[in-house]
Amino acid sequence: MSAAAAPTILAIETSCDDTCAAVVTGDQIRSNVISSQGIHDRYGGVVPEVASRHHLELANVVVDDALARAGATLDDVDLVAVTQGPGLVGALLVGVATAKAIAAARGLPLASVDHLQGHVAANFLTTGDGPEDKPLEPPFLCLIASGGHTFLANVTEHDGFTVLGRTLDDAAGEAFDKGARMLGLPYPGGPHLEKLARDGDPSAFTFPTGRGVSGLDFSFAGLKTALLYKIRDLGGGSDPSALDDATRANLAAAYQHAIVESLARRCEQALAQSGTDRLAVGGGVAANGPLRDRLATLGVTLKVPPRALCTDNAAMIASAARFVPPHPFPEYLAMDAYATGERGL
Ligand code: KG4
Ligand code: ZN
């Protein structure tokens, strides 16, 4: 690698149920491979032990595929990057062991990346030729809403962020998944609930939007309970199929509206407090159409990366790795994964 050339990074991400590898040079994504383990759908959620076993089977294949799609070999790689945490420890360990083995075999440095910093760093990549596809430079606010995390970050540097608010209970994606389950929809529930809600009226029912929560934090547990009681009061009991289709669609629309409002109002509040007029969104929930539409009404510059960069992926880990000091060989051989990060997220 010449001094001026951007390093080529091979990144691995296995924090939950997606086995991911990517090759990134500078802010250019050369490949971004995501192998989703559809096996968890039948259990209604991710089973950690099953996730780890599948990562073991998939890790080498996914890495080979990422290199092949990038038209690269390990000879072209300058740095290996891996998600160290937070996440499912057994799942993370597979990625960490794979990354260590590849890096050590080549005597390459290894960058350990925080998964949440990765979600933020998805915004530092070029995603196309349009002006909206250029990297977003700090400062900006960033809402991350996934199945495992929901927080609002103040991003002032490339290598860190401060948490302005976080969920006090469930993540927004978890609220979508649990609500969907109560309405008899399959896992992961977000996209199914969004689809059902298209035929419904969001004002047919009123659900709590976390207004009672102080500051910029979020809460979705009360919303979930409210839906449970509403289904019961409507005669659905524990069997949502006892409700007619129109009622289920109205419930889905009103429930989604409450989640979208909770997220959007906090963003609006945070933007007003920080004086920033730029907002980025990440995590699987960023795929939600009504959320995107609502955030677009805030009158600020809104950046929503392509879906493959919003959900868990390794290109975002490579992007974050560009800004963390790498561990030289063989220092990283003793490196461990962590379930919960310093921020308590
Ligand atoms: O980021 P992600 O792929 O995985 C992690 O949780 O880390 O996010 C998955 C979450 C699930 O809870 C899923 O239901 C939600 O994102 N999700 C959606 C939509 N697509 C995915 N929620 C609402 N509307 C969607 N269209
Ligand atoms: Zn994630």
Image: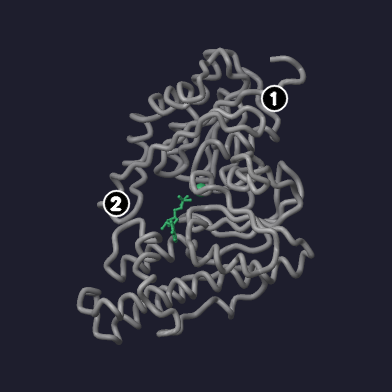
Indicate the position of residue 176 as horizontal and vertical percent values. Answer: 42, 64
Q: Amino acid at mark 2?
A: Asp
Residue 70 vertical position relative to residue 241 in the rendered view, above or below: above
Residue displayed at 60% across by 37% down: 113
Q: CA distance from mark 1 to mark 2?
A: 40 Å
Nearest to N terminus: mark 1 or mark 2:
1
Q: Is residue 263 above or below residue 129?
A: below
* Secondary structure category for the residue under label 1: loop
Q: Which residue is mark 2?
A: 41
Instruction: Pick the residue in front: 304 or 318.
Output: 304
Query: What residue is disc 1 on?
Result: 6
- Using residue 36 as the reference point, say whether residue 314 is left or right of it: right
Q: Is residue 78 visible?
A: yes
Q: Element at badge 2?
A: helix
What residue lies at 37% left-to-right and 69% top-to-bottom? Answer: 179
Q: Position of residue 68 (x, y in %)?
A: 45, 21
Residue 73 image position (x, y, % from top left): 51, 16
- Applied colour scheme: one colour
Q: Is mark 1 within 8 Å of ligand 2?
A: no
* Percent x, y of residue 313: 50, 40
Q: Give the total of numbered labels.
A: 2
Residue 275 figure quarter = bottom right
Q: Identify the image quadrant of the C terminus.
A: bottom right
316 sits to left or right of 48: right
